[in-house]
Amino acid sequence: MTRCLIALATLLCLTFPVFAEEEAADTMPSSSPSIKQMVYITVTVEDQDAALKWYVDNLAMTVSMDFPYGEHGERWLTLTFPGQDAMKSPHLVLFKADHAYDKTVGLVHGPVNNIYLEVDDCAAMTEKLRAAGAVIQAEPTEMPYGIEAAWKDPDGNLFTMIQPSMAPM
């Protein structure tokens, strides 16, 4: 597991290309739904407090969000690197494994997904992706943090889209 976490940390240190809204506006028609940015990368952990300590002590990460949600006492815990622009860089989510729910995310769309993309209009993007041949795993669903939907690309890779209801993410 330590080797996996080190590999993940190495990946997280890479710079993710993120387009500013102005650049996206130049490349996409305003009437077309688009993905704005990658916002979350999720790792499943057995103990959120122990994982938090490990990431803070060993990778110098800092807590960006930490609050309870849901009916089952879930905890939304995200980390970033010091100096990281939290509005333009993905957050690392420490998602507690809940074997009773077969490691599901929000009980919405099945197996834990690792990539979350922010969108302006979740319903419109879902229809655009459906028309492009994506397999919709979960229709747009209202959640405490916004509207969420999940889809698989032609190779079966699972993605989650979030239309946030709160700012910033």
Image: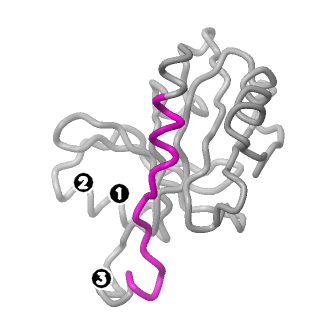
Relative to 82, 114 lies left or right: left
Residue range (magenta): 7-24
State yes or no: discs 1 and 2 in contact (Cβ < 8 Å).
yes
Relative to 108, 169 lies left or right: right
Mark positioned earlier in the residue sequence (3 or 2):
3
Residue 134: image x %, image y %?
22, 48
| Residue at (58, 29) in percent of width and height | 107
State yes or no: discs 3 and 1 in contact (Cβ < 8 Å).
no
Disc 1 marks which residue?
126
State yes or no: discs 3 and 2 in contact (Cβ < 8 Å).
no
Mark positioned earlier in the residue sequence (3 or 1):
3
Q: Main secondary structure of the magenta part?
A: helix
Kind of residue at badge 3: Met
Q: In the image, is residue 6 above or below residue 80?
A: above
Helix or strand or loop: what does disc 3 sit on?
loop
Disc 3 marks which residue?
28
Quick one: 157 or 72, which is closer to the camera? 157
Count how many numbered circles sit on residues in the image: 3
Q: Which mark is residue 130?
A: 2
Helix or strand or loop: what does disc 1 sit on?
helix
* Cα–Cα span, label 3 and label 1: 17 Å
Specify few, some or many for label 1: CA neighbours under 10 Å numbering under 14, 14-19, or 20 or more.
many
